[in-house]
Amino acid sequence: MKKLMYNIIGRLRGTFHRKKLRSQYYSYFGFLQWQNAELTGESLFLERILPQFIKELKSPVFFDVGANEGEYSARLLSVFPNCRVECFEPGALPASRLRIRFQDAKNLTVNECAVGGECGSSFLYDYAYGNTSEHASLFADVLLKHHGAKKLNKTEVLVKTIDQHCLDAKIFQISLLKIDTEGSEFLALSGARGKINEGLIDFIQFEFNAMNVFSRTFLYDFYNILSNYEIYRMHRAGLIPLGAYSPREEVFVFHNLLAVRRPLAHKIPERYILRDRGR
């Protein structure tokens, strides 16, 4: 019995040790740090890095694609009071709440539509109890297989491309494009090929996680469309350079990536580049 107890305790200690090592690994390399803006690296990027590149612009233009409740847009307005923010949110109720929240912000526009690879319409899937959750996605399997939903609501929504919206809204250059669309990030980028190829989007922040399994998009696809950019993993302490594409970076757990137009990437202060955590 005593030997059995020692074996059980040893196994429990081993399991605890492995979980602790895994947690430390994820934290060190910027994975699964979704709990707040400091851990994701968003705060450091918005408050310390980005201002150095747009301080001479009178009214930088920011796109918040997948704005949800507007937390990211609120941070943009706080740090850059003279900016112009274009919010995109396909859900009717979240879009309505955005309008209420930012009703006094004259420099913010709420666009009630999804952003995709071509203009038209698509279905937005959400939990059966309402079209309001932050998990709403253009891919049903994101909710069914990843979040374990049993029943879904399906709502037809308008889809626009970033390129077309820029034409309609007379927007020439985008300083920052942020995309958080529960698996359709690559579709959104596909609709911005014109601006990307013309070098008219400076910074692109997007999530890469398990949702990419269900949309069947790889980091390789992002590298192909962002061939004129340097790609970094965002971290609370700085930016981890991913360098040239490697299959080893196909990690389907939450992390924020930042694509920086190559001429600008070389101007990021070295103190923010975590080279010891890259390859």
Image (cartoon, rainbow, N blue to C red):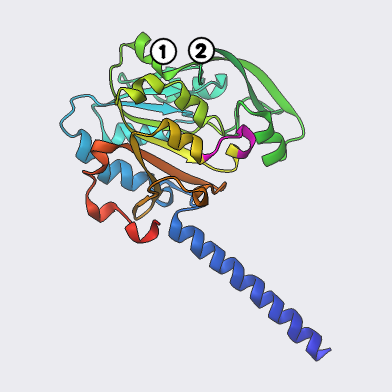
Residue that protrudes farthest toward the right in the picture:
1
Query: Where's residue 261, x and y in %?
Result: 30, 35
Q: How many numbered marks are there?
A: 2
Quarter placement of the C terminus: bottom left
Rendered image: mark on residue 164? 1
Quarter of the figure with residue 64: top left
Name the residue located 37 percent from the left edge and 33 percent from the top edge. Answer: 74
- Which range of residues does the magenta coloring cover? 213-218
Does 229 appear above or below 98? Answer: below
Quarter placement of the N terminus: bottom right
Amino acid carrying mark 1 in the image: Gln
Rendered image: mark on residue 65? none
Name the side, left or right, on which 90 lies relative to 145: left
Query: Where's residue 119, x and y in %?
Result: 51, 12
Query: Where's residue 266, x and y in %?
Result: 23, 44
Structural crowding at the residue carrying mark 2, measured as other residues with C-alpha within 10 Å and reported as few (<14), some (14–19) or many (≥20): some
Label 1's element? helix
Whether the magenta-drawn stretch holds residue 141 is answered as: no
Name the residue located 30 percent from the left edge and 53 percent from the top edge. Answer: 273
Residue designated by label 2? 119
Query: Where's residue 118, x and y in %?
Result: 51, 15
Does 23 appear above or below 110? Answer: below
Quarter of the figure with residue 158: top right
> In this rendering, does residue 147 appear at all?
no
Residue that protrudes farthest toward the top in the picture:
168
